[in-house]
Image (tube, rainbow, N blue to C red):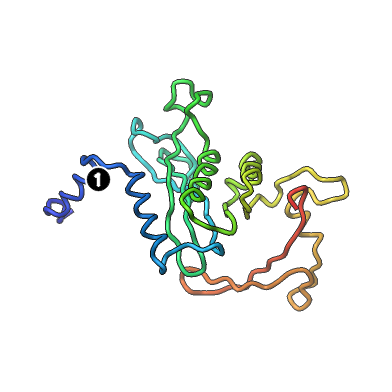
Amino acid sequence: MAGAQYRAVQRLQFFLSEAPWEHEEVNARRLERLLDDPRTAPHPDGVLVVDDSGDPKDATTTAHVGRQRLGRYGKTDNAAVTVTTLWADENLYYPLHAVPYTPAHHFDQGRSDPGFRTKWPIAAHLARQARSAGVPFRSAVADGAYGDVDDFRCARHAADVPFVMAVRRRRGTWARTHEAHTPIDAALELAWHGPERAGDWTPVTRTFRDGHTAIWWAADATLGFWG
């Protein structure tokens, strides 16, 4: 707060809040610079990360604000939520596009309003936008908030976008009677006799942000018509 009245701070504040500028044009130029720089240029081995992020807000009439689930806080509260995409590989990551989710009560006809969109259509649009911007990636990845939405998975499949998405371990899917119907069913069909005889499972060393590591186990399983 001590530096809030500095001239440089005031100029930046005016630029962000009052000056006429188009955020999409600014973002497009930012991406051009990232794609042109050999140090940050995306490559086909990277991934497109689809996610959303929410921030609590005290206001009730501000655009895009409403009572929403805040995953990182583990609660539902008054908040603004933005759907985002970023490109990442093992060395770096950076944001690509972002669109705020607008709760239904902001529209005259609520959820029936033609302008209302849930988060997954916004995410699907952002994935297409990344491709249109010339960003290569080997697959789109998302957590269970998107992986559990059948329409979102179908949209990605129809658009020929490979995807890796989390689903709840007991999330059911259509399959023949004798086949696995949930992720946990599929996992139990794989051979495992302990760490010394891991069978179908492969040890993976995971490095966390604080630097510590842990051994996790990964395997390929077949579930329903998704394979």
| Numbered disc 1: secondary structure | helix
**Residue shown at 48% from the left, 53% from the top:** 134
Instruction: Report whether 86 appears left or right of 216.
Output: left
Residue that extends furthest to the bottom in the rendered view of this protein: 196
**Residue shown at 49% from the left, 48% from the top:** 132
Q: Nearer the viewer, residue 227 or 39?
A: 39
Crowd class of label 1 (few under 14; some 14 to 19; many from 20; radius 10 Å): few
Q: Residue 183 in the image: state x and y as whole percent.
A: 73, 53
**Residue shown at 56% from the left, 64% from the top:** 45
Q: Nearer the viewer, residue 76 or 95?
A: 95
Q: Residue 219 in the image: state x and y as whole percent.
A: 72, 65
Q: Quadrant of residue 35?
A: bottom left
Residue that extends furthest to the right in the rendered view of this protein: 178
Residue that extends furthest to the top in the rendered view of this protein: 109
Considering only vertical position in the picture, is 77 above or below 196? above
Q: Residue 48 in the image: state x and y as whole percent.
A: 53, 55
Q: Quadrant of residue 164?
A: bottom right
Instruction: Report whether 206 appears left or right of 4.
Output: right
Q: Residue 189 in the image: state x and y as whole percent.
A: 81, 60
Considering only vertical position in the picture, is 129 above or below 211? above
**Residue shown at 55% from the left, 43% from the top:** 124
Q: What kind of residue is marked 1?
A: Leu
Mark count? 1
Q: Nearer the viewer, residue 61 or 110?
A: 110
Residue denoted by label 1: 16
